[in-house]
Every structure is written in structure tokens, then in C-alpha cells.
Image (cartoon, helix red, strand yellow):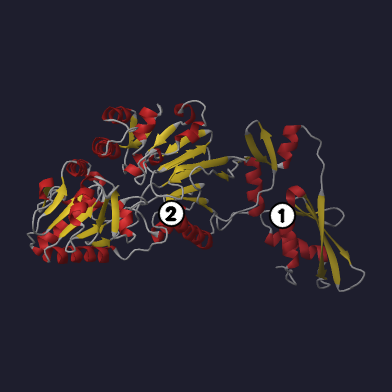
């Protein structure tokens, strides 16, 4: 039987370092090639050595790589794989991802190599060389892998709720053999988006009115633009003068790409684009490091989003000891990052050996994440109707909850493999069989025109296999084709019936009834007083036990089983005392 093999080399019972190997129809496909933000050694990259097993190169083992989107936990290890591990095969991603990916990679390289001084990391040239190998595809092309009749659907990150700059995720009812879905918020059901926005604006406004500073760590794309649009419109509406800053450089470039790929955004932004580009911010200015210690209130968006380095961590160190200040974490933080530590309630954090800071600032978590919640994940599963579900990009305990929910509510097999664990799914491909015209015509004559053409009908015939082709034919056709001697098997059914009035003989009574009810068939009498309905023999004989009843025998061959069964059903329901 055909089978699909799936192995996560990252994001298996974990968030970050997304990388799944799918073996389908003899092809090995890598879905995403991400980096883990919680590690500073080789563990930040997927387990590439698992692929080769010490034999040959990655190119020999991987047919292609498909990147779902530009988040670093989905594309961050790509230059490492292609330029340092030697993969030289095709890499596919959308045009916006190809444009934005090198900007994010270069920014992260600067933080990791130039500022932290780490080694065993890719350089700027490697990023450029890697991007030259990328083959761009059109936006909105779903990652639906199909080889023959076997298929796999991969989600990447998605959200079923539309926001201020992007529409909701959607998928066709494609019924894949396997759906691989992220499960970051597998146990969470969020409040309404409007409530979260109102709460966010209220907290920011109250803090700056009280003279405090608000730090919002974000990644350069996605939540950053979403929250900028939200604060921009609120500042406009409330006529506030408190400065809002965005870390310069990276995010400016990213926002320029949003303007370039305006068709990528939701309908509202596309509709108003001619009059006003929503990404032209009047109240939000570029941030300069010299502003960190400026007196008075301010709101600062700074990258990266998990406080694992860069400007956001630098500002956090300076502001965290003042109880008037606030940090708002708008998205998920992986284990090991400073963001994850403060969200778990730690009030003293060792940022580096010997440097411990006490956190006095207010810490808030407000989910404006790009990930679907439990309700959204279930909604997507119902939309595409898969045969199996595999959970990735989530914590093991939360996956258990969602797996149980999928089993109980949707009655689907669900898997949650750890990194390096193989899931094998056996598929049942449909078998295509042609039907001969003779067989179809014969069945139509027997059954008549069905009032409901969508109703499933049984079709009896003989299967002929020639090479890779299969055909269902009428028995007579099969005998002729195979040059066989014909043997006939006949079935006889006996129906116990009351004797009709003396004025009519039993066979005349049956003849008149069949002529009336079986108009499309040839009803005749034989020389010995029996009836023939096409090739179905009907004869009547008295019964010894009961003088008021007689036995009607109906005999047919296997080829006429449909008609034979139909006649016996007619007799069992009884016939009128007099046929007119």
C-alpha cells in the first residue's frame, strides 16, 4: 500500500525551528527551514545530519525546499543549510517572502555575529548567494503537495481572524491525506479582537498619561504594522501628542515592502490605497538610541519581539527598573528567551553572567499573534476535511489537549511527533475502473431512469484487467473477450401466494399484472404454460399443505439478478385481485 512519511526536524512538540521532511511518492520535500530563538549554539538549527545519516549530501537526499513565510523560525536556517551544509537544490517561496527574507536574515546576523560575536554562523554573502537559488511563486498558492492520489497540506503560521492589514486564512475543501497544522495556541480561545484592541489602547493611554514609558517588542513585520495602524488611528482620534517611535532601519524597509506588495493586504487597505496609504504614519517617527533616556512619556516599538537581543533588549534593560514604565508582549515567546522568562513571572533575570536586573516595570501580555487559537485550528480542519492531522509548532502538553479534541469531535487520527520521530500514514488510493457501454445500457434498461441521478447504484459485471487498465464489462462481453465456455448459474426463489378467483387462471392473472407493471420488458408465455419476462422464468404450482395458496417460482441467471430480485419483490408485495 502507498504510504506517506513525515519527520519533524524542528517544531516537533516545540515552537521554533520549523522544519518537516515529507516523503511522498518517492520524493523528499522539506517544508520550512527555521531557526530556534531560544538557543545560541547548533541547536538553533534543524537536525540536518538526520537527513543524510552520514551518507552523501543534502542535495542527494532532498528534492526541494518550500518556505511558507518569512518569519525567522520558518526561514532562519536557510543560508546555513544552503551555503554551509551544501544544499544546492531548488528552494520555493512567494515573491514577498523572497523580498523580505534577506532583510530579516541580515538583521539577525548583525545581532548574532557583529554584536554578540558568535561564530559558526552565515555571513552577508551567504545570505545573498542563498537568495539567488530561490524560485519565487505567486502569493496565495497553498502548500498542497500531491503525488498521484496522495496529498499533504501544510499550513505554516495562520490566523482565522482578519486584522487591520491582512485578511483571514482560508483553504479549499481539498481533503488531503494529511493536514500538517501549527498548534502554538492549542489550548487558547481568545477574546474578541475588538476587546483586545480596546484593552491594549486603554493600557497604553493610561501609562503615558501617568508619565510612563511603554515598550512594545515586535518583529519587523506583521504585528508591528498591525499595532502601528491601531495606535496611529487612536492618536489621531484622541489628538494625543505623546511621541511614538519605531526602531529605525529594519522596520522602515519592511514597511516599504508592505507598500510595494499592497495587493497582499486586506480589502480595506487596497480600497483606500489611492487616497491614503495606511502605512504612511503621521504620529510614528524613527527611533534613535539617544532617545532611550529622554525624560517624559513615550511609546516605542522595538525589534526583536522575544527580547532575545537587539534594541528591544537594550531598551528593556534601561527601563525595567522603573515601576512607572510598562512592557507589552503582543505575541508568543519561545522558551529560553528573556520575553518568555518575564511572561512566566520572573522578577529577577540574569541577562548575562554577573548581570542581574530586577524587574519593577509592569508586564502585560496581549495576544495579537499571527497564530490561530484552538477554535481557529478546528475551523481550518473542518474546512479542508483531511483524513489525518499532524500537529507541529506547539508545546507537547498543549498538543495533547488539542489532539484529544480532534479525536473526540472530528473522529480523525491525530499525531504529534517529537523531533526526529517518524509518522507513517498508509493511504488508500482510489482505483479507477472504466465501465463498458454495453454494461451501462443493460443496467439502465433493467433499472430504468432513476429519479435521483446522485443515488449510488450497484453495478454487476466482470472486471477485466489488461496491463494497468481495468474495465467492468457485461458477462457476455467477458466470455467473448476471453474465449471461454459459458457456464450458467441460476437462482430460484419461491413465493407463497393466494390463489386468484376462479374466473381467472393464476398464470393469466400474473401475465396481466406483469404486462402492466413491467412495460419496458418483454412478457411472454411459453408452450408449457409458464411465463418469460425477458429471460426470467416464472411458473406456478399448487402447494400440498394449503389448497387456498400456490407457490410461484421465479428463476433467473446471475446476469439478470437485478430484474429477478425486482420481480420477486413485486410478488411479495401482492398483486390486485383483478388486473385491469
The outermost residue toward the right is 544
Would residue 443 appear left or right of 248 to someone viewing this image? right
Could you tell me residue 215's position as x and y percent?
Answer: 19, 55
> What residue is drawn where x is 32% and y is 61%?
345
The outermost residue toward the front is 354
**Mark 1 vs mark 2, CA separation in Å:** 61 Å
Could you tell me residue 194's position as x and y percent?
Answer: 25, 64
Say whether disc 1 or disc 2 marks the residue closer to the N-terminus: 2
Report helix, strand or loop for mark 1: helix
Question: Which corner quadrant of the image does residue 369 belong to?
Answer: bottom left
Could you tell me residue 355's position as x and y percent?
Answer: 26, 50
Would residue 540 appear left or right of 265 to someone viewing this image? right
Q: Which residue is mark 1?
A: 563
Report helix, strand or loop for mark 2: loop
Q: Is residue 542 above or below residue 83?
A: below
- Give the crowd class for mark 2: few <14, some 14-19, many >=20 residues within 10 Å: many
The quadrant the C terminus occupies is bottom right
**579 or 281: nearer the viewer:** 281
Question: Which corner quadrant of the image does residue 188 belong to?
Answer: bottom left
**199 or 466: nearer the viewer:** 199
Could you tell me residue 4's position as x and y percent?
Answer: 54, 41
**460 or 332: nearer the viewer:** 332
> What residue is drawn where x is 42% and y is 61%?
187
The quadrant the N terminus occupies is top right
Q: Which residue is mark 2?
A: 395
Residue 368 at least partly seen: no
Would residue 239 appear left or right of 566 to someone viewing this image? left
Amino acid at each position: 500500500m502507498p504510504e506517506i512519511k513525515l519527520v519533524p526536524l524542528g517544531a516537533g512538540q516545540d515552537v521554533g525551528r520549523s522544519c518537516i521532511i515529507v516523503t511522498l511518492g518517492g520524493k523528499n520535500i522539506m517544508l520550512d527551514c527555521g531557526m530556534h530563538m531560544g538557543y545560541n549554539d547548533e541547536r538553533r538549527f534543524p537536525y540536518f545530519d538526520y537527513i543524510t545519516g552520514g551518507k552523501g549530501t543534502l542535495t542527494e537526499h532532498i528534492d526541494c525546499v518550500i518556505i511558507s513565510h518569512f518569519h525567522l523560525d520558518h526561514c532562519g536556517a536557510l543560508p546555513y543549510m544552503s551555503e554551509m551544509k551544501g544544499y544546492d537544490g531548488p528552494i520555493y517561496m512567494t515573491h514577498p517572502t523572497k523580498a523580505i527574507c534577506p532583510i530579516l536574515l541580515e538583521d539577525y546576523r548583525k545581532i548574532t555575529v557583529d554584536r554578540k560575536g558568535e561564530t559558526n554562523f552565515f555571513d552577508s554573502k551567504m545570505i545573498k548567494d542563498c537568495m539567488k537559488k530561490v524560485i519565487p511563486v505567486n502569493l496565495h498558492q497553498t502548500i498542497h503537495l500531491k503525488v498521484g492520489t496522495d496529498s499533504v497540506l501544510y499550513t505554516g503560521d495562520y490566523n482565522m481572524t482578519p486584522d487591520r492589514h491582512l485578511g483571514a486564512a482560508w483553504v479549499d475543501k481539498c481533503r488531503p491525506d494529511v493536514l500538517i497544522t501549527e498548534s502554538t495556541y492549542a489550548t487558547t480561545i481568545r477574546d474578541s479582537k475588538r476587546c483586545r484592541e480596546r484593552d491594549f489602547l486603554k493600557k497604553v493611554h493610561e501609562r503615558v498619561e501617568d508619565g510612563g514609558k511603554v515598550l512594545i517588542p515586535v518583529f519587523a513585520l506583521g504585528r508591528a504594522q498591525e499595532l502601528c495602524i491601531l495606535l496611529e488611528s487612536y492618536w489621531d482620534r484622541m489628538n494625543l501628542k505623546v511621541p511614538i517611535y519605531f526602531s529605525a532601519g529594519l522596520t522602515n524597509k519592511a514597511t516599504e515592502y508592505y507598500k510595494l506588495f499592497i495587493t497582499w493586504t486586506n480589502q480595506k487597505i487596497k480600497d483606500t490605497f489611492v487616497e491614503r496609504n495606511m502605512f504612511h504614519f503621521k504620529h510614528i517617527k524613527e527611533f534613535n538610541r539617544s532617545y532611550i533616556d529622554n525624560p517624559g512619556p513615550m511609546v516605542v516599538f522595538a525589534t526583536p519581539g522575544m527580547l532575545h537581543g537587539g534594541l528591544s533588549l537594550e531598551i528593556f534593560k534601561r527601563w525595567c527598573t522603573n515601576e512607572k514604565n510598562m512592557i507589552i508582549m503582543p505575541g508568543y515567546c519561545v522558551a529560553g528567551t528573556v520575553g518568555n522568562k518575564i511572561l512566566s513571572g520572573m522578577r529577577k533575570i540574569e541577562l548575562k553572567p554577573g548581570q542581574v536586573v530586577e524587574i519593577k516595570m509592569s508586564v502585560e501580555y496581549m495576544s495579537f499573534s499571527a497564530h490561530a487559537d484552538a477554535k481557529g485550528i478546528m475551523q481550518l480542519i473542518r474546512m479542508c476535511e483531511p483524513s489525518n492531522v499532524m500537529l507541529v509548532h506547539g508545546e507537547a502538553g498543549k498538543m495533547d489537549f488539542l489532539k484529544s479534541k480532534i479525536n473526540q469531535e472530528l473522529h480523525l487520527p491525530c499525531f504529534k511527533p517529537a523531533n526526529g520521530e517518524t509518522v507513517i500514514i498508509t493511504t488508500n488510493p482510489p482505483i479507477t475502473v472504466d465501465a463498458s457501454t454495453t454494461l451501462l445500457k443493460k443496467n439502465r434498461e433493467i433499472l430504468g431512469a432513476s429519479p435521483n441521478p446522485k443515488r449510488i447504484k450497484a453495478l454487476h459485471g466482470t472486471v477485466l484487467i489488461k496491463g494497468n487498465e481495468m474495465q467492468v464489462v457485461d458477462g457476455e462481453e467477458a466470455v467473448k473477450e476471453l474465449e471461454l465456455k459459458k457456464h450458467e448459474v441460476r437462482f430460484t426463489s419461491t413465493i407463497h401466494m393466494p390463489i386468484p378467483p376462479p374466473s381467472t387462471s393464476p398464470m393469466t392473472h400474473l401475465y396481466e399484472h406483469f404486462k402492466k407493471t413491467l412495460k419496458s420488458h418483454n412478457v411472454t408465455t411459453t408452450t408449457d404454460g409458464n411465463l418469460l419476462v425477458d429471460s426470467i422464468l416464472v411458473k406456478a404450482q399448487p402447494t400440498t399443505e394449503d389448497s387456498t395458496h400456490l407457490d410461484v417460482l421465479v428463476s433467473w441467471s446471475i446476469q439478470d439478478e437485478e430484474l429477478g430480485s425486482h420481480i420477486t419483490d413485486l410478488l411479495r408485495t401482492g398483486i390486485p385481485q383483478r388486473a385491469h
